[in-house]
Image (cartoon, rainbow, N blue to C red):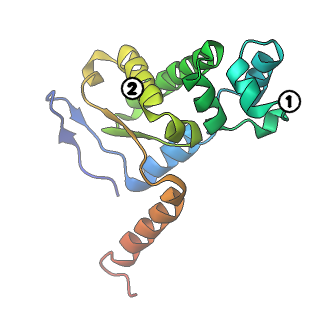
Amino acid sequence: MGKPARVSKSGISRSSLTDRGAAAASANTLKRWRADWPSPPAAAQAVARGQAPALARLVGRADVATIRSRAIARAIRAGDKVIERFVHDAAEWLGAGVALVINLLAPDVVVLGGGLVEAMPELIHNTVTASARQRVMQTYRDQFTVRVARLGDDAVATGAAAWAQRILTLPGIDG
């Protein structure tokens, strides 16, 4: 079962998500937000149009499916403004989605992960946070934290192990 209602710093009562609910919310709501955004086709189009010379040097005439987060991050560091705009816009839209989740479910913490977040955590974190804060209801504006995941590729296995440990140590479970 979920945790009982509690009073937040603002004095507003909120219900916490159950562990299972939090997992479902993150899996179902944000799972489709792939680590390779902005979309490889958009990045490939920018290369083809000559708008992303650094990315062109990094990936050449590569198939769009091979354009990865590290190459996008390197292109931005090398000065590809079009690619930086793609990433910034995508992070702003992700922030809008985060705001929606906060308005509906009121989580205390939102964790961002994936290839592009790992490749440029500061840009993604700052943009998503600012975008979400602009869009959430005033009630929640200072009641949540956005964090960057630290587990990387081990996140799923670590989460599954933690869930299994919790289930196996519940009272009444013989293990």
The quarter of the displayed image where residue 93 is located = top right
Which is nearer the eye, 54 or 85?
54
Q: Nearer the viewer, residue 49 or 113?
A: 49
Q: Position of residue 87 (x, y in %)?
A: 58, 22
- Residue 34 visible in rendering: no
State the residue lying farthest toward the bottom.
175
For residue 41, above or below residue 67: above
The residue under the point 58% across, 42% down is 115
Residue 79, above or below 66 = above
The answer, for residue 3, to whether it is visible in the render is yes
Packing grade of label 2 (10 A; few <14, some 14-19, many >=20) is some
Residue appearing at x 37%, y 52% in the figure: 18
Q: What is the three-letter code of the residue carrying label 2?
A: Asn
- The answer to whether 115 appears left or right of 65 in the picture is left
Q: Observer-nearest residue: 139 or 58?
A: 58
Q: Which mark is drawn over residue 103?
A: 2
Quickly name the residue at label 1: 61
